[in-house]
Amino acid sequence: LVDGVAAMTRFVNLLASDPDVTKVPFMIDSSKFHVIEAGLRCVQGKCIVNSISLKNGEEAFLEEARIVRRYGAAVVVMAFDEEGQAANYEDKIRICKRAYDLLVEKINFPPEDIIFDSNVLTICTGMAEHNG
């Protein structure tokens, strides 16, 4: 298996050494937050973290957000919570508002650094609950 931390560190350091590449923000992405944090340690300037969500609860969400903020990065927030993926309009609004309020009110995360991914679903997921 690939060592995600080592691969992220090597890759971001390699990219960060090229002045043409560093003219645009990096998006740091991994399904493992410790790998994202490894990328944050190496990147120069403002980047975007893809992503955090409430699926593991408020405490984990806020801890990851604090780390993102410490590095000065923006963050993509997925419309997931402890109950799962938001599939309808009401759930998307509820989860995104909850995440926004937690970020801004509890940890003073800059609102301009929050990007929402409301999980626009494809037409044919094959899941009956997504038909509509």
Image (cartoon, rainbow, N blue to C red):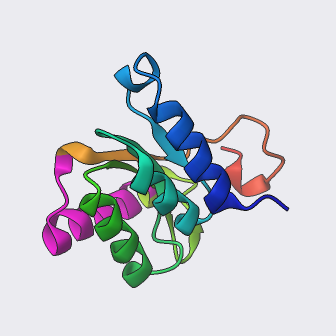
At a point 25% along the width and 70% down the height, the residue shown is: 102
Q: Is residue 56 above or below residue 119?
A: below
At a point 68% along the width and 59% down the height, the residue shown is: 4
Q: Confirm whether residue 39 shows in the render.
A: yes
Image location of residue 17, percent across then percent down:
46, 30
Left-right relation of 26 to 31:
left
- Magenta stretch in the rendered image: 92-111
Of all residues shown, which one is farthest toward the front? Answer: 17
Q: Is residue 59 above or below residue 39?
A: below
Image location of residue 62, percent across then percent down:
33, 74
Which of the 4 image quarters holds residue 90? bottom left
Task: Pick the quarter of the image with the C terminus.
Answer: top right
At a point 47% along the width and 39% down the height, the residue shown is: 27
Left-right relation of 50 to 1:
left
Image location of residue 39, percent across then percent down:
49, 52
The question of residue 40 being in magenta is answered with no
| Number of marks present in the image shown | 0
Q: Main secondary structure of the magenta part?
A: helix
Task: Pick the quarter of the image with the N terminus.
Answer: bottom right
Image location of residue 24, percent across then percent down:
38, 24
At a point 57% along the width and 61% down the height, the residue shown is: 35
The question of residue 108 being in magenta is answered with yes
Q: Is residue 62 above or below residue 20?
A: below
Of all residues shown, which one is farthest toward the top? Answer: 20
Of residue 6 and residue 77, the one placed in the foreground of this image is 6
Of residue 73 and residue 3, the one placed in the foreground of this image is 3
Q: Confirm whether residue 78 shows in the render.
A: no
Which of the 4 image quarters holds residue 86? bottom right
Left-right relation of 42 to 72:
right
Of residue 61 and residue 70, the one placed in the foreground of this image is 70
